Amino acid sequence: MESVGAEEPARANCPGCGGAEVRTVQETCADPASVHDGLSDRLASGPVMPSRGDSWLHFVEGALMTGVCAGLAYSGVQDDKPLYTIGGSLLAVLLLIGTVVVIRGEARERRVVAAGRARAEELSRSASYCSGCASVFYADGTPWQGVLTPEQYQKYVWTEAGYGTRLDARAKDVALPPGIPVRQGGTPDHA
Ligand SMILES: [Zn+2]
């Protein structure tokens, strides 16, 4: 992006390549081109949070299917078909358990994401992205003076925010630069 006018002191150059094609990470993520080519996902400051609407839908689906199986079990009782009774009851119980597990998991995911959001936003707000060398850096040198790949940046932010276990394989296996002050955020969580 070109700046009009003489000097624009606020805009820092990339410490990696010296380039000036720099935007904040948040601007970069909001750019439709970044959404399209996946860069927004690679720079996302947290995992996608299942909405309450999703959970409500899963509850309704689970309840409906449980009801169908319960109906099957009931018809087994009425018509004296023990196979229907046993099969229907068993399926109804399994569906009920499955629905509870899914909904509880989604609620837990929402809590984890909410708990780390402040830290994740803090770390993403001050980060910049250089499209010249595809690096992330902090213009003021805090908390890190060097450049990071999008994967290193994401691992750093997610680990600090307590989302470390939710990183996808690409970012999980990447090594952070030695010396970066990373600490595990959030609550210990072994999914
Ligand atoms: Zn650069």
Image (cartoon, grey):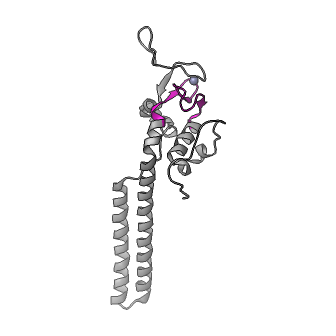
Q: Residue at x 37, y 73 (%)?
A: 66
For this rendering, which residue is in front, 185 or 148? Answer: 185
Q: Residue at x 59, y 43 (%)?
A: 171
* Quarter where residue 56 is shown: bottom left
153 is within the stretch colored magenta: no
Q: Residue at x 57, y 44 (%)?
A: 183
Q: Residue at x 58, y 22 (%)?
A: 15
**Which stretch did the figure color magenta?**
123-150
Residue 101, image x, y percentages: 45, 66
For this rendering, which residue is in front, 106 or 127? Answer: 127
The answer to whether 39 is drawn above or below residue 185 in the figure is above
For this rendering, which residue is in front, 150 or 185? Answer: 185
Residue 106, image x, y percentages: 42, 58
Can you say which quadrant of the picture contains the C terminus? bottom right
**130 horizontally vs 110: left or right:** right
* Quarter where residue 90 is shown: bottom left
Tell which residue pokes out farthest to the bottom in this image: 80
Residue 150, image x, y percentages: 56, 35
Tell which residue pokes out farthest to the top in this image: 6
